[in-house]
Image (cartoon, grey):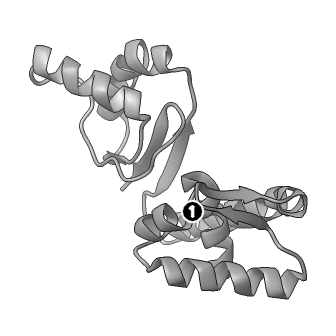
């Protein structure tokens, strides 16, 4: 429903490089580059400064970022509403927190959450949280969070109900 270029734009920002964005979107780096080039052509200005170390937003890119995020969020709300109308349990909760909170407070909170709400998938977490959680799981077999680490967040993660 929304232009793929908007999703690519957002993913490049999240991942920092076209290569990582391509991996996350399951497309080729060339497809990511082509999509961004098309977006830039349609808008009439560059949105990224490309370098060997990655992609950085231009001033114009920073200006349109909130608008594109709003479009993506509106699309998510539309999908949620459609799921509600169709009687499906769907949705997501984004949790952003300091690493220490993610390590010490969130695991018991999420364990409690798991007991009171429909099933969900844990989609993302910081690399530090992944390491700390793996160590904690070794020390406390059967305790801690388990799930799919498909989406990286600076801290905390993304919980997605199924």
Q: Quadrant of residue 26?
A: bottom left
| In the depicted structure, whether residue 136 falls above or below residue 158 | above
Q: Is residue 118 above or below residue 105?
A: below
- The location of residue 73, given as percent across then percent down, is 69, 59
Point 57% across, 71% down: residue: 82
At 20% from the left and 20% from the top, the residue drawn is: 135
| Image vertical order of residue 53 relative to residue 79, above or below | above
Q: Is residue 99 visible?
A: yes
Query: Which quarter of the rendered picture does the N terminus lie within?
Result: bottom right
**Which residue occupies the foreground of this view, 131 or 85?**
131
Quadrant of the image occupied by residue 141: top left
Q: Position of residue 11 (x, y in %)?
A: 58, 62
Residue 84, image x, y percentages: 53, 63
Left or right position of 137 against 69 = left
Residue 30 or residue 76, whichever sits in front? 30
Residue pictured at 29% horizontal, 27% vertical: 131
- Name the residue tied to disc 1: 80
Query: Dividing the image into 4 quarters, which one contains the C terminus?
Result: bottom left
Relative to 142, say whether 123 is above or below. Answer: below
Circle 1 sits in a helix, a strand or a loop, which is it? helix
Callout 1: few (<14), some (14-19), or many (20+) C-alpha neighbours within 10 Å?
some
Is residue 2 in view? no
Q: Could you tell me residue 127's position as x and y percent?
A: 39, 34
Q: Is residue 51 left or right of residue 40?
A: left
């Amino acid at each position: 429903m929304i232009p793929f270029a908007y999703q690519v734009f957002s993913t490049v920002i999240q991942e920092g490089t076209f290569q990582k964005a391509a991996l996350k979107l399951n497309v080729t780096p060339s497809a990511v580059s082509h999509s961004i080039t098309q977006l830039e052509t349609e808008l009439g200005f560059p949105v990224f400064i490309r370098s060997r170390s990655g992609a950085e937003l231009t001033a114009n890119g920073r200006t349109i970022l909130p608008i594109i995020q709003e479009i993506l969020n509106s699309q998510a709300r539309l999908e949620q509403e459609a799921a509600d109308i169709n009687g499906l349990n769907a949705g997501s909760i984004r949790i952003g927190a300091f690493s220490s909170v993610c390590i010490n407070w969130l695991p018991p909170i999420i364990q409690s959450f798991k007991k009171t709400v429909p099933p969900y998938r844990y989609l993302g977490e910081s690399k530090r949280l992944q390491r700390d959680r793996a160590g904690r799981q070794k020390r406390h077999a059967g305790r801690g969070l388990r799930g799919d680490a498909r989406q990286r967040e600076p801290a905390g993660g993304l919980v997605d109900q199924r």
